[in-house]
Image: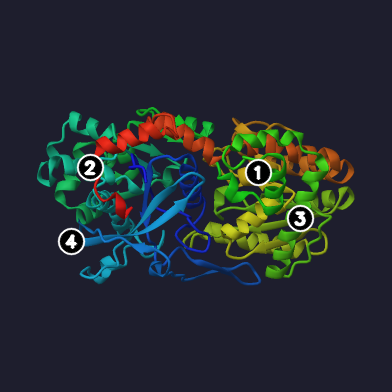
Amino acid sequence: MTAPRVAYFSMEVAFEGATPTYSGGLGVLAGDTLTSAADLGVPLIAVSLAHREGYFRQRLDRDGVQSEEDVSWDPSRNLERLEAEAVIHIEGRPVRVGAWRVLIQGATSTVPLLLLDTDRPGNADVDRRLTGRLYRGDDRYRLCQEVVLGMGGIALLAALGLDSIDTYHMNEGHSALLTVALLERNLGTEQLDSATDGDIEAIRERCVFTTHTPVPAGHDHFPRTLMEQVLGPARARVLHVTQCCPDGVLNLTFLALRFSRYINGVAMRHGEVSQGMFPRYPVRAITNGVNAARWVAPSFETMFDRHLPGWRRDNFCLRYAAGIELEEIAQAHRVAKETLLDAVRAATGQPLAADVLTLGFARRMTAYKRANLLFMDLDRLRRLAGPTGRLQVVFGGKAHPQDEDGKAAIRQVFEAARQLRGQVTVAFVEDYNIQWAQLLTSGVDVWLNTPRKPEEASGTSGMKAALNGVPSLSVLDGWWLEGCLEGITGWAIGADADSPSDAREDAESLYQKLEAVVLPTYYARPKEFVAVSRSAIALNGSFFTTQRMVAQYAIHAYGLAPLGDPAADRERDRTRGYRGLKEL
């Protein structure tokens, strides 16, 4: 393989749907990113954790009460264990860190993904469990995990002879301690607190940071006593000296900001919001995307192959979907919709009908997503669904085990479904995952998204839907500010992006748009509705891809030469002299 010049760190990566190494959007985005990097031949290596015990399997009772079941997997069954091993120190103890290798296959190359694992002989039991559960544990467990990811990742790359990588990309702040590891390699542990601005600048030149949340509470932070306990006094001192501990609290976002030459949000609006949150740092924006080949339903895949050969290698070819006949698009959607409805009937017993307008809502269940906005006025919903045309809704999504508001939102959906029985059919699929996401984003008729502004950093589910000709009905936040052309690619909820969210006003706008526009277009003007579907593919499906996103990172964040230059790659490999590449 081409010697990697970029190391991409992410706490979670969805590299395969059935393997529980992800919890939701961040991990799915990371998996799409790596696949597109392999498509484009970007010289990149990725680092994450093995998460042997995964996130959790969701179980819902008849009232929508969520319970969690443990889930586990054995990487030795289908992954390759690397021989290299590194040792880091956590709470003063030596901890051995190994890795499993996954090769992410793309159209032109592969990208290696290293899943760090502390379940190694010689480690204490408490340390062997550090790469177990994803996002489930107390602050101590979380910080120790982030030491493994950031500092263990740097140590493992060095053990593989890959310590001269040009750019370290932190996908969210979980891996920010890699900056301390890099500083430590330059200065030595005992000299850390003597770090000068020049020493910090040397690390900044090698680091890139992508922030994914506009909510201050979403950024990991830890009290000083815990930081000193886990990291040790020398590392704790350097974090104070480098001003990464405002008010005596270790904030990993501030750490990543302080040590990064390039910082970006994940949508244009999110970049603006993040700049307001962190005014001392220049925050740019690279809008998220999705991997087109990974999310296109089989019926659309066949249609694209027939009309737009080469679309997998060049996603911008999907722009020319504008020339595909409306009936072909309608037929491809009918197939995808039947596939979804069959799966939902089998899983939930809900009798869904193919000729009924079907809304889809599937996100992480948490308060700001407002999954229950559609049900704010049940009488109004009944009235608009009656005379204008029938309506059915499919929901999916997990709440974090400690998120009581998110769990309550699921129960509210179930209660609304009970009250609407016989008038508006509502189904909720259990244990939402990549397989369900592929079915829902391609099989519903309209994708519903109702976040509280400006708390949607980007969102990618609507992008997946657009690839499959499913228009969005969404609040003007995140990516939808860039993707919404009213009545062309979908419809907006609310008047504008700048006014603060008001739940009652947003609900009223949602009801009005359904009643006056979406339902009558679907039932009375079906060709017009399919024309919106076609535009969603041509305008949004062709642009909001990780192929475009990764190319932007390569140019703006990584500073790579034009992609796909074999001569430049060979010369770079010859001069860099990496060790251990055969193992990768």
Q: Amino acid at mark 2?
A: Leu
| Residue of label 4 | 94
Question: What whole-number distance in Å separates the C-alpha atoms at marks 1 and 4?
Answer: 48 Å
- Sooner in the amino-acid sequence: mark 1 or mark 4: 4
Q: Is residue 138 left or right of residue 414?
A: left
Question: What whole-number distance in Å separates the C-alpha atoms at marks 3 and 2?
Answer: 52 Å
Query: Could you tell me residue 583's position as x and y percent?
Result: 30, 55
Q: Residue at x 36, y 63 (%)?
A: 80
Mark closer to the observer (4, 3) = 3
- Sooner in the amino-acid sequence: mark 4 or mark 3: 4
Above or below for 144 versus 511: below
Q: Secondary structure at mark 1?
A: helix
**Closest to the observer, 538 or 107:** 107
Query: Could you tell me residue 245's position as x and y percent?
Result: 26, 41
| Residue of label 3 | 335
| Residue of label 1 | 467
Q: Secondary structure at mark 4?
A: strand
Which circle marks residue 182 in the picture? 2
Q: Amino acid at mark 1?
A: Leu
Question: What whole-number distance in Å separates the C-alpha atoms at marks 3 and 1?
Answer: 15 Å
Mark closer to the observer (1, 4) = 1
Question: What whole-number distance in Å separates the C-alpha atoms at marks 4 and 2?
Answer: 18 Å
Q: Amino acid at mark 4?
A: Pro
Which circle marks residue 379 in the picture? none
Query: Could you tell me residue 63's position as x and y percent?
Result: 65, 69
Question: What whole-number distance in Å separates the C-alpha atoms at marks 1 and 2?
Answer: 40 Å
